[in-house]
Amino acid sequence: MPHFVYMLRCKGNRIYTGYAVDVEARYSEHCSGRGAKFTKAFPPEVVLCTFELDSREEALRLEARIKRLKRPQKEQLAAGDSELESELRAGLGELLKPRKKRSRKRKKKCAGNCAKSNSSPNLRQGQ
């Protein structure tokens, strides 16, 4: 089953990028205000382009790469820049290396001189 990444031109000349299995159905959802918060605020005007991919993972990776592009690059991609598209598609199917676990910094134990103290200056002593 093919998976798609699509780009929409929305109100205010904004560009929205998303993922779908059925772009036409997803576009209808966006137009009706049910698709996403962004397209509810800035209704879509036209589908700029679509990219077909073999797997969901590849499609989501491409979507993330497109979303990181600056506006002029998104405009180039939507206009059909095949070189930019090739760069973005390169390595989509590769397996990701597992992330190394980051060690958490441990909190230092209070040695009696902590900022927060159990005694309050407003309390009288001896009562």
Image: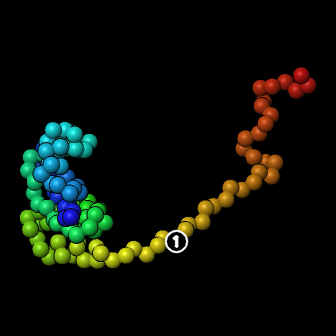
Which quadrant of the figure has residue 122? top right
Q: Position of residue 41 (x, y in %)?
A: 21, 39
Please tell me which residue is depicted at 56% across the width and 66% down the height of the picture. 102
Q: Position of residue 4 (x, y in %)?
A: 19, 61
Q: Quadrant of the N terminus?
A: bottom left
Please tell me which residue is depicted at 39% across the width and 74% down the height of the picture. 96
> Which type of secondary structure does the marked residue at label 1 adopt?
loop
Residue at the extreme right: 126
Q: Position of residue 65 (x, y in %)?
A: 27, 65
Q: Amino acid at mark 1?
A: Lys
Residue 60: tell me if it is visible: yes
* Residue corresponding to mark 1: 100
- Above or below — where is 96 with respect to 4? below
Please tell me which residue is depicted at 15% across the width and 38% down the height of the picture. 32
Please tell me which residue is depicted at 13% across the width and 61% down the height of the picture. 50
Give the class, few, some or many, for how many residues have Cα within 10 Å of label 1's Cα (few <14, many ≥20).
few
Q: Nearer the viewer, residue 1 or 117?
A: 1
| Left/right of residue 114 with respect to residue 78 in the rendered view | right
Q: Quadrant of the C terminus?
A: top right
